Image (cartoon, rainbow, N blue to C red):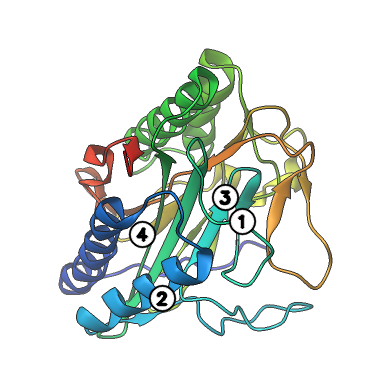
Amino acid sequence: MMKTVPLISSKDAKEAAVSAKHVVEIHYALTDFLCAGLSLPEIDAFVGTKLRDLKCKSAFHKYKIPAQPPFPSQSCISVNDCVVHGTHIMPQSPLSAGDLISIDIGVKHNGWIGDAAWTWGIEHVSEENQKLMQAGRESLASGIKAMQPGRPMMDFARAVQGVAESKYGFFLTRGLGGHGYGKTLHSPPFVSNVVPTHPSEWPDGWRTFEAGMLIAVEPMLAVGTGQIENVRGTWPIFSADHSMTVHYEADVHITEDGPVDLTEGLQEIPYIVGG
């Protein structure tokens, strides 16, 4: 049986929009801050400072799921082959020119969550990695446009897969995807980035988008595989072949008139920083 999806009022939507705006502000601050030589602890400390400046708390710090220790960081910091859930305490050299870094920011503000991720290249990137970032951005934008009220969630996966895999030839990470949110970080529905190969893989796939839904959608792409590597009891998830990865996530409010990107402005962030 599919779980009930919470729907929000127009008043709640305004509160959620404020939290999403704070996420965007932190991403813009990171755009000016990131450069070669920074360590992951320095980056996470910067995020913590910005959260406090905005009178927010991290939605990730000490977050707990079964079989995992509490999440140790203020943000998820994932470099190169780390798809998602990178921590500031995992073994990782300081940033170098040519690296790709994805940072997922989760805020709590007045009881409402904001949750979005973005990827930057440090100083310069290879032609392939530039295309990977383009594919991630375009797939997210295409997926959001497909989130129309009354349409099945499968439309989102078709749109994202059509860009990331069919157009660009990269791989979307299987088994991971977007989620409902609101006053909690994760709630139904699960939103896959890929069309399932069998119905039990994504029971929510034929559920329709409804006005009042808040959904964080997040394509995760890798150059060489859609499979992951994860050591049980640790948070970071890597591409199984350790090829380069990107992660893009937006907060979307479904209205009667269509999807509203509460994290609008992230697409204006430059691809390359620290040069």
Which labelled disc corresponds to residue 110?
A: none
Distance CA(mark 4)–CA(mark 1): 40 Å
Residue picked out by circle 3: 79
Q: Quadrant of residue 92?
A: bottom right
Residue 57 pos. (x, y %): 35, 83
Q: SS of the residue at dot 1?
A: loop
Distance CA(mark 3)–CA(mark 2): 17 Å
Q: Quadrant of residue 215?
A: bottom left
Q: Amino acid at mark 2?
A: Ala
Residue picked out by circle 4: 213
Name the foreground residue: 128 vs 209.
128
Distance CA(mark 4)–CA(mark 2): 32 Å
Residue 61 pos. (x, y %): 51, 81
Q: Are marks 2 and 1 in contact (CB under 8 Å)?
A: no
- Going from N to C along the chain, the mark reached first, 3 or 4, is 3
Residue picked out by circle 1: 93
Distance CA(mark 3)–CA(mark 4): 31 Å
- Going from N to C along the chain, the mark reached first, 4 or 2, is 2
Q: Are marks 4 and 1 in contact (CB under 8 Å)?
A: no
Tell me, yes or no, if residue 162 can be seen here: yes
